[in-house]
Every structure is written in C-alpha cells, then in structure tokens.
Image: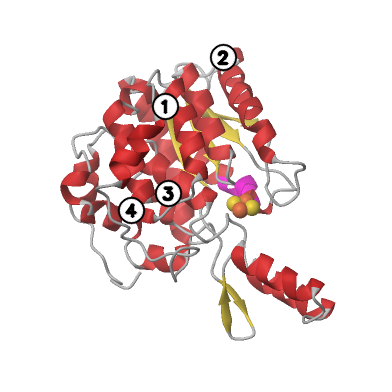
Amino acid sequence: AEDYAGKPVIAIVNTWSDLNPCHGHFRERAEDVKRGVWQAGGFPVELPAMSLGEPFMKPSTMLYRNLLAMETEELLRANPVDGVVLMGGCDKTVPALVMGALSMNLPAIFVPAGPMLRGHWRGKTLGSGSDVWKYSADLRAGVLPPSAWGEMEDGIARSNGTCMTMGTASTMAAVTEAMGLTLPGASSIPAVDSAHARMAAAAGRRAVELVWEGLAPRDIVTRAAIDNAITTLMALGGSTNAVIHLVAMAGRAGIELPLSRFDEISRTTPVLANLRPSGEYLMEDFFYAGGLRALLKNLGDRLERSCRTVNGRTIGENIADAEVFLPDV
Ligand code: FES
C-alpha cells in the first residue's frame, strides 16, 4: 500500500486471449507497458477485457463491438484508476476500446497490436484475407491438396499480429493514430519488431504524464481530428468497415458524423499507399517505407496539422521530419 500511495494508477485494458493469435504477443507486451508505467512513477494494473478475435469467434465479432465498448467504459468507471493504456488490434477491438475510453474520458493512450510479418509460401508473398480465400477455393476445387493447404496456412501467419494487408485492423489502427490517440508511428510497427516493445513501454510512460497533465481523449478527438482520420482512411485505400466504426467513435466524442463527410473528403483525397488488397505491398513494407508518419506528411494541407495528439504535441509537429524511403510502397 505504501508503494501505491500517491502514484497515478494506470489501467492496462488488455484484450489478450489464447484464442486470438492477432493479440498473442499482448501477454508479454503488457509487461513492457507496465515497465514504462513504473519508470514514470505510476502504478500499473492489468484489466483483461474480451478479445474479439476474428479467426475463431462466430457468427461475427461485430455482434460484440458494443459489448466490449461497454466493458471498457465500465472497467474504467468501476475501478479506482486514473489513466488507461488500451491494448487492441484485431478489427473491432480498436473502435470498441476507443469508444469506451471516449465515453469514460479518463486520460488514455492506445497501443495497437501491430501487423503480422509478410506471409511467405513456395516463393510467393502472401497477404491475409485475399490469399486465404484464393487458396481455400483451390482446396475446394481439388486443385490444391490438403497437405499443401496446411503448408500455406503455416506460411501465411508467420508471427503474432493483426492481418498485414490494409484490412480493417490496419485501417483502424492507422485512423486511431491519425486521430491522435497513439504515439507517432505506432500503428505501422510490426507486432514482433523490437520497436513494438519500445513503443509499448513509451506508451506506459506517457500514460502517467497524461494523468498529471489531465489530457483526456475528448480533448484530442475533435471534429478536425475526425476529418484527419477520414482523410487518412482515403489516402490508405483503407477498409470500408472504418465508415461504420468512425461514425460510432465520433458519436462517443459527441460529434455527429454524417456519411456525406466521407464522400466530401474522398473527392479531394488521393490514394497514396500501394497496399493490398487494393495495391501490391504489405504492412511490413509500409513500415520500412516510413510508415504512417510518411504518408501523413505527404497529405500536405489536406491534413489539419494543428490537431493535438496524445504525446502533447500537434500532429504537424509529430510528422515534421517524416520521410518516404520506398516510394513504390
Ligand atoms: Fe485479427 Fe485480421 S483476423 S486482424
């Protein structure tokens, strides 16, 4: 009790589960977050929350997004905590955690799970989603033997982490960063890169500072920040599911978001990323190419640079020195 006295209590809302390989590294990654919280003089407490893993939950994780949002909000309301680190990544966990945190409005920072490494099989680069369905069709047609299907499965999921195409998980992590709720660059880091552990510890440290500064999610998620998120969605060629989730997230911040706003922004925003399924590359390539910070920098005036972010600086300041290293990506 003596160690605890006077230290900000930081809740780590962790959506780890044995049945969610996308978050398989979160058990150990929570220890990195805790190390950061301790370093900054806080007291970490881990609060497990339901995992919503796309690979196994039936009939659809969408049935549970709002349940996780409520769980997050009530975990934060019911327990004696001062700030929060949200750990999510697989599709609906991202909007759910953010929605709950916005409703509760305690100082909060998001730690995205990060994408898996690129898939490899028989000399080909595989991407989650599209390649699974392609080879599943081959299996059912009898063109691909079951043993080869097993090899393909082993090759397509080479690490923990979320789908490494620009599917819902990568999209939602990126829009959450663009909204200002992650540390700069966090959403592009592959789950098993050592940079991911460093980012998690830094998020733990920052969560403690957020409590002292009193900076809460609704100070960050403004109408302009939502516009930045939509602009980012369009520039990435991101998932259409983001439309549903962004409307819900904005609602929790008290911002009405009509569908017409997506249409307006889409008419003036070019697609800048060359990522599957609409393009060629995968999230690991995007990370090596400079990641989301580089893409945001290339949006120029389309991005409202004065928006505040969770590290206390503006998004414009966060991307000032960003560079594109691989222009094809
Ligand atoms: Fe979890 Fe795709 S199945 S991110």
Of residues 194 and 92, which is closer to you in this image? 92
Q: What numbered label is drawn on residue 250?
A: 1
Mark 3–mark 4 Cα distance, whole angstroms, equals 24 Å
Q: Is residue 102 above or below residue 30?
A: above
Residue 247 is drawn in which quadrant?
top left
* Residue 20 visible: yes
Q: Residues within 10 Å of mark 2 (few under 14, many from 20)?
A: some
Q: Is residue 25 magenta?
A: yes
In the rendered structure, which amino acid carries the disc numbered 4? Ala
Residue at image position (41%, 21%) is 253
Q: Secondary structure at mark 1?
A: helix
Q: Which residues are magenta?
A: 24-29
Q: Residues within 10 Å of mark 3 (few under 14, many from 20)?
A: many
Q: Which residue is mark 2?
A: 77
In the rendered structure, which amino acid carries the disc numbered 1? Ala
What is the x, y in percent for residue 265? Answer: 29, 42
